[in-house]
Every structure is written in structure tokens, then in C-alpha cells.
Amino acid sequence: MYQFLFNITGNEIIAGLITACIPLVFILIFVLFAVWFERKVSAHMQDRLGPMRVGWHGVLQTVADFVKMLQKEDIIATEADRKLFSIAPVLVFAGSFAAYAAIPFSSKLLGSEVEVGIFYVIAISSLVVAGILMAGWSSNNKYSLLGAMRSAAQIVSYEIPTALVVLSMVMLTGTLSLDKMSQMQTAHFWDWNIFGGPTFGFAKFLLIPFMFVGFLIVYISTLAEVNRTPFDIPEAESELVAGYFTEYVGMKWAMFMLSEYANMFSVSAIITILFFGGYQSPVGYLGNTLGAPALIPFEQGIWFIAKGIFFVFVQMWLRWTLPRLRVDQLMTVCWKYLIPYAFINLIIIGIITLL
Amino acid sequence: MALKTETMVLNMGPQHPSTHGVLRLELELEGEVIVNVKPHIGYLHRCFEKHAEVMTYPQVIPYTDRMDYLASMSNNFGYVVAVEKLLGIQVPDRVQYIRVIMAELQRIASHLVALGTNGLDIGAFTPFLYLFRDREHILSLFEMTCGARLLYNYMWVGGLSHDIHPDFVRLTKEFVNYFRPTITELNNLLTFNKIFIERTANIGILPLDTAINFGATGPVLRGSGLAFDLRREDPYSIYDRFNFEIPTGKGLVGTIGDCWDRYYVRVLEMEQSLRIIEQAIDPIPEGDVQSAIPKRVKPPKGTVYSRTENPRGELGYFIISDGNVNPFRIKVRGPSFVNLELMGELCKGHLVADVIAILGSIDIVLGEVDR
């Protein structure tokens, strides 16, 4: 994408800026949609209607909320550390936004063709932890501090099982690049990594159960990384009021929400790329049938976003069904179950790949 | 050399999403572990007992509504039973039957809120709304009968404010049939949910002797394993005519007397209340519900203590009469107030997240704690 724009404009900065704006625009539109979607999903699960007033079935509700948020007074508590307090939401959002740089939306639309894509995503999303700690500390509020501490512990712990599963996928595919991973899982669903990858043979069938285990582990740990129920302990509204962003109002608060929803999609996107063929269509392309190859990247984009939104939907589904774990039980799940299983899975996949 | 450490004091409430009103808990924390809990009450104090001294006996009834606002019928019931005992009047059977049905419906409605908010505090949002949907049916029945949905002023000294609606019997039967399966739904959704059990089993264990020493009553006491229910121990009204069981905590998934037991006792009690309603709905005799209402409530000199089984435990009214039209003194023994004292005992050594699970399982209503 960057190369393409560079060829047109002939200017590095303009090309870079335009490339960066595409995910930003996507995030904003996605968040507008996702907040409405979450409210609708929860409402229908709970025998309610949800927002109905603004637009058709309340589709513009989030826009209205956003306008309200813009008008709010920007309150900073007198005892808060003003600088850190203002930087924290930006840093949190920057972390989740930066992860989008390496996510291929289709074969033509990706921010940066970094070879170490998945490594970069895992590394950059850790930046969020620093922002959360800053928010919790600078608010000078005990609830915020408790929430930030819990959150830091949780995100750092759950990165380990995620990284282990990602490692096993890297061993299987032999590449760190998210784009190459997507390309390898060609345009049929039986070539997806969850069904053992594109190579056909005995090893493919051996891999399938371990792929499912890997998928479950990574799905559970990403749920924890984006602070969704049953792991929404950092912001547990019935215990810690709102966790690390208790003291925030208006747009600063909106930045945290923006970051949360952006994260929800980015982890779903990573799962899609690792296991579910990335932007590849499960059934072949209309562009091929019609003889119009130019259509293919657009179709890929639609498939990618559809798959991502499906996993976002599952996250919402779980949120409105399950109660919340306690902070020590959360650590137990991670250290006593997920990490050992992820290790065993890693070793077995390694052996199968060697065969 | 060890570093000097201090405990942190965290104020939970009076504005906090899960202190069930305006309770303030002063938590002393060592990290996230509770060292001590001090409940501070009184934010909702409305001088009920002092007010009652300048009101006539029937005028006190609307005030009793406003104590335990989730179980107004039961509060009315307790008060009128006490005053009738003081007056020494007999109430017609029709009134008695209707009162029992209303009290049991109220018990179900109150338990639904208790169970729902207990789940809500633990993070399960959806069951809460399902239970509110079911509570709505009961509130409609009440609304149909007396026009009010929350504060009924329905039971009067010697009778009732309104007779039941002609459709009431049919709709109540429909409700009973509708509600039985939803208890199963609740059990599937929340009660036996693995995470819910993890959060509540073996948490806030209340040994039976502690429960008795603190004077705990209602589901809190029964959760610790003692089948003590005033409807059986000291039958008032016509409770001696019905068959029902008294569920107790069995330690099904943890230890006897933990949060889960207190929760599950409430679930089982709803089924027993349904049984009582089923037995009481058919034999309602014909008659006038206002025939025994005295023209002027002026009890003779004397005192009375009458206790009834509120959804939250023993609701006692101690009334001193000096032979006048207004009571000389009314003292209320509120179950929530007494049960709340257990907080300090139950929370020690648990985490912050457990405090709200324990508070939810005790099920307090601040309107009645502060009166």
C-alpha cells in the first residue's frame, strides 16, 4: 500500500500519512459500529430492545453519544498528575492503533509489509500496559490504582500463552509475516491453519486437534488481554467502579473506549490470520469467476472484516453470558492451565512439523 | 531488613455501584486482602420510629412500606399482625388467605431481586434482567390489586385496602405455572455456572454458632444449616395450614454456610413459596375484606412484640401503647440491620472482589437498615 502510494505521490511523508489514515478511519467507523452492535447484542440477549431512537434501530446512537462526549467539560482532578493524566489515554490508544500497521486487510491493503509482523504486533500492543499504569497512577484514586495494577498483571501474564501459541504457528508456517501467513492459507477453508494448513497429507490430520487446542488457548488469552468478561477484572464495574479510567471524563474517557474496541478487533484479526485464513475467502472468489481480478482485493477485505466481526461478536456473546472471575482465579487459569497446555501444544506441533 | 508496610483504607460507598444503596464500607486492605471491614450506616435515616409516635396506628402503615421497599407487603403484614394482636381482633379467613398469597408473592419478588443483584455484583448482567422480567409479572399482579407497584399500603389493621381483582386467581395460577420453569432456567444460567460457583463457593463461610450469636435470621441463618423459619416455629396468620419445606444450606458445592448456600436457599425458597401459593389460591373463602376493620384503632394500654418471616429474616415490631390513638413507641427489629453486622466477620482474609459477593449474599436493603 505504502509503495503504491509512494509511486503515485512521490513523497514519503504524504504516502506514509495516507497509509496511516486508512486504519484510523477504519477504527473510528468500526468503533461507531461496534458500540452500537454491542448494545444491540446485549439488549437482544437480555430480552430488551436497546437503542431505538436515533436512526433506524438506533444505528446513530453512538454518533449521538460521541457528540455528547465532545461537549463534556474536561475535568482533571486537582490531586492528579496533570501531565501523565493527559498522556495516558493517548498512549493507550497509540498502542492499539499501532498494531494495525502490520495487519493485512487484503492482499493489497496493508499498512506496512514488515517481515516480523506478528512479533511487532505482540510487542507494540504491550505499550498499552504502560498507558494503563500511567492512567491508574496519575489519577491518584485508589480504585484506579487497584484497577491499573490488576490490569498490568493480567495483560503481562496472558501475553505468555498467546506468544507460545503464536510461536507454534510460526513454526508451522515458517514465517513471521502476517501477509505471508494469509497468502499460504489459500482460497479454500480446508487450507486454513485450523484444519492443519495448506499441505495435504498425514501430518495435516494429525495437526487438526492441536490446532483447535491452540485456537482455544489463544482465544481465551486474548479475551483477557482486551479485558473482556469473564476477565474484565481491571474495570470490574461492580468492584472498582470503572478501574483505571474511573477519573476520566469526556474525550479522554472516549479514547480508552476507542482503544478497547480497537483492541477487540485487532486480536480478532490476529486470530483470523493465524487460524482462519486471514483475508482468504473460504469458497473462492467472485472476481475469478467473473474474470475480473481487480475485484479480488475488495472481496478479501470484506471477508477479513466479516471474520473479524464474527470473533468480536463471540467476545460480546461471552461478555453478556458469563460472570466475572476473581483476580487470583484469573492468574490460576493463566499460569496453571493455559501456559502448560500451550507449552505441550508447542512441543507436539514442533514434532509434527519436523516429521 | 523488612520494609515497613502499611494497610490501605479504601472507602467503598456511599456512592458505589454494588453497595445496594447508600451503604459505606470502610475497608482496611493489605494489598487486596481485607484486614477489617467497618460498615457505616445512616445515610438513609428517615426517623421512622420517631415519626410513628405522632401518627395514628393506621397512618403508620405507609411508613412501613418504605422500610424494606423490596418487600413492602411483608412489612405491612408484620405491622398489622402486631397491631391486631394488641387490639385482640380476629380477622376473616378471606383476608388471611389473601394476605398469605400476597406475602409469598412478595417473597418471590424480593428473592428475585436478591439473586439478580448477587449475580450482577459478580459480573453476570444477563440473569439480572431475566429475573426482573419475572418480577414484573408479580408487580403487575400487585398493581392490579391495589394500584401500586412498589409501596402498596395494602394490608390494613383488620382487613385489606382493596378486594382482589376478579381475574387475580386465574392470573396468579398462570404465573405459578409460568414461573416454575424459569427457576430451572435460572439454575442453568447462573446457579450452576462454573464461574459463579468458583466465585461464591467457600467464600464468606458463616458457621452456625456465629450466625446464632450474631442473631442472624432468614436465608442467612438457614444457609448455615439451621431450619429456622418463623412461619413454622411461631406460626402467625394461617401459616400452620400449609405444607411446605424449609430449605437449608447443604454445602452442595462448597462448605455449609458459604455465599453459594445462602444464594441457593433463596432459590429453593421461591419454589416453596410457589407451593404455598398453590395451596392457598383455591380455598379462598367468599366474604368482605373490610368487615373487621375497626372504626377507630385505639388499643388498650400494654405492649406487644410480634415477629414475622420477612424475605430477609425476622421482622419484629415492638409496640408500646398508652391507650391513645397513636403508639407511644414502636421499635423495629430489622433483619437486614442485624444481618449486616456479619460483614466484618465474614470478609476477613478475603479479597476486595469477595466483599461484594458476600454483601450480595447477605442481601440487605438500606431502607430498612437505616429506617
Image: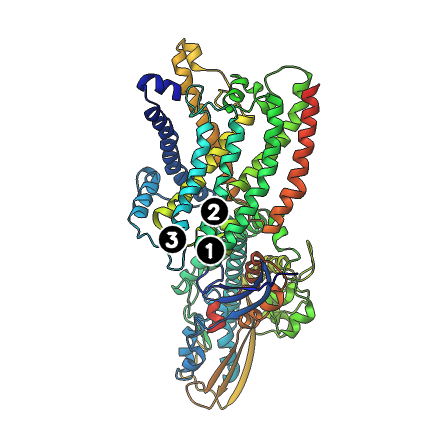
| Residue at the extreme top of the image, as rendered | A291
How much space separates mark 1 and mark 2, taking CA atoms? Answer: 16 Å
Residue in the foreground of this view, choosing between A248 and A228? A248
Q: Evaluate whether label 2 is on the same chain as label 3.
A: yes
How much space separates mark 2 and mark 3, taking CA atoms? Answer: 15 Å
- Label 1 sits on what residue type? Val
The residue at which mark 2 appears reads as A132
Q: How is the image coloured?
A: rainbow
Asked if disc 3 and disc 1 are in contact, CB closer than 8 Å, the reply is no
Q: Residues within 10 Å of mark 3 (few under 14, many from 20)?
A: few
Relative horizontal placement of residue A53, taking residue B249 as reference (left or right): left
Which chain does tag 1 point to?
A: A
- Label 3 sits on what residue type? Arg
Q: Give the mark nearest the N terminus, 1 or 2.
A: 2
Q: Quadrant of residue A32?
A: top left
Q: Quadrant of residue A100?
A: top left
Q: Which numbered disc covers residue A82?
A: 3
Relative horizontal placement of residue A23, taking residue B236 as reference (left or right): left
The residue at which mark 1 appears reads as A241
Residue at 45% across / 57% down in the picture? A140
Q: Evaluate whether label 1 is on the same chain as label 2.
A: yes
Image position of B211 with respect to B299: above or below: above
Q: Residues within 10 Å of mark 2 (few under 14, many from 20)?
A: many
Q: How many marks?
A: 3
Label 2 SS: helix
x and y percentages locating residue B258 in the rendered image: 65, 60
Which chain does tag 3 point to?
A: A
